[in-house]
Amino acid sequence: MFHELEESLCEITGFDGLSLQPNSGAQGEYAGLMVIRAYHHSRQQSHRNICLIPSSGGLMISYGAFWDFLFPPGAVDQALFPGQSYSMLLTHALLHAGTIHVLMNAVIFIALGKTLAVYFGLRLVMLTMLLGAVSSGVAFGLLESTAAPMVGASGVVFAFIGLWLQASRSELKRLGRPGRSAVSVMMSLIVIHVLLHVFMGGQIAWQAHLGGFVAGYFLMPWLIDRSHSPTY
């Protein structure tokens, strides 16, 4: 899929080649600057060495990312605006660190979101999104201690995954068929995160993923009417 995306972007932009690496936003920006620098050198224009960087991206991270030093909510001494320690529990899910980050979340988000909306209805899906974002932020704040910002909708995605797995398990039980145990599900998640850790170069917030999954797999079923039947 990534190879096809690279080819499509080359065709659209007219570039001879394109890479989606590195995955990290900061490293990607640095790689892009090095490519621009090499381009100027190839045209004998080495004197073009000034880069004007807009502040909008930094402001979005500063105001919207999850910052560990503002957790637990209520910390105001270092907040940029009143209520930031509360709003960041939601706004961090709206920001992403790079192209790969957005694509991975978007594909699963759209696919599972549509499936769950058909099964449970849009209102429950929206509630899952809200609870997944908050739970991922809380879990990250409790389990991590870092000065780096945390962004991304991965917690919401894992809330969707958790709810989907729980719904599948309940449906199998209703049909009299054995479903996967919670232990086997958690073991599968561990394996997935090991692979993600390698693929993403360690740039994953597993704590946020765990918080989102717990919200979807364990908390959301409490809010679901057990007599609810799927709509097709």
Image: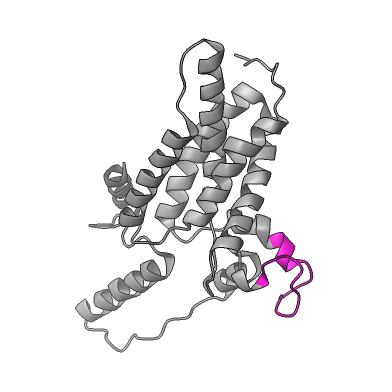
Which contiguous range is marked in magenta? 70-87
Q: How many marks?
A: 0
**Residue 80 in view in this figure:** yes
Tell which residue pokes out farthest to the right in this image: 82
Q: Is residue 83 magenta?
A: yes
The answer to which of 129 and 36 lies nearer the viewer is 129
Of residue 99 and residue 62, the one placed in the foreground of this image is: 62
Q: Is residue 151 left or right of residue 45?
A: right
Residue 6 position in % (x across, y down): 30, 49
Which is nearer the eye, 77 or 96?
77
Q: Residue furthest bottom?
A: 47
Residue 65, percent from left and from top? 60, 65
The correct choice, above or below, for 136 with respect to 220 in the image is below
Q: Does 5 appear above or below 172?
A: below
Name the residue at 65% across, 15% down: 229
Give residue 171's quadrant in the image. top right
Judge whether residue 125 can be spotted in this image: no
**Residue drawn 47% across and 81% down?**
52
In this image, 140 relative to 16: left or right? Answer: right
The C terminus appears in which quarter of the rendering?
A: top right
Q: Reply yes or no: does residue 59 show up in magenta.
A: no
Residue nearest the observer in this picture, 67 or 49: 67
Q: Residue at x 40, y 41 (%)?
A: 187
Tell which residue pokes out farthest to the top in this image: 175
Q: Position of residue 5 (x, y in %)?
A: 33, 45
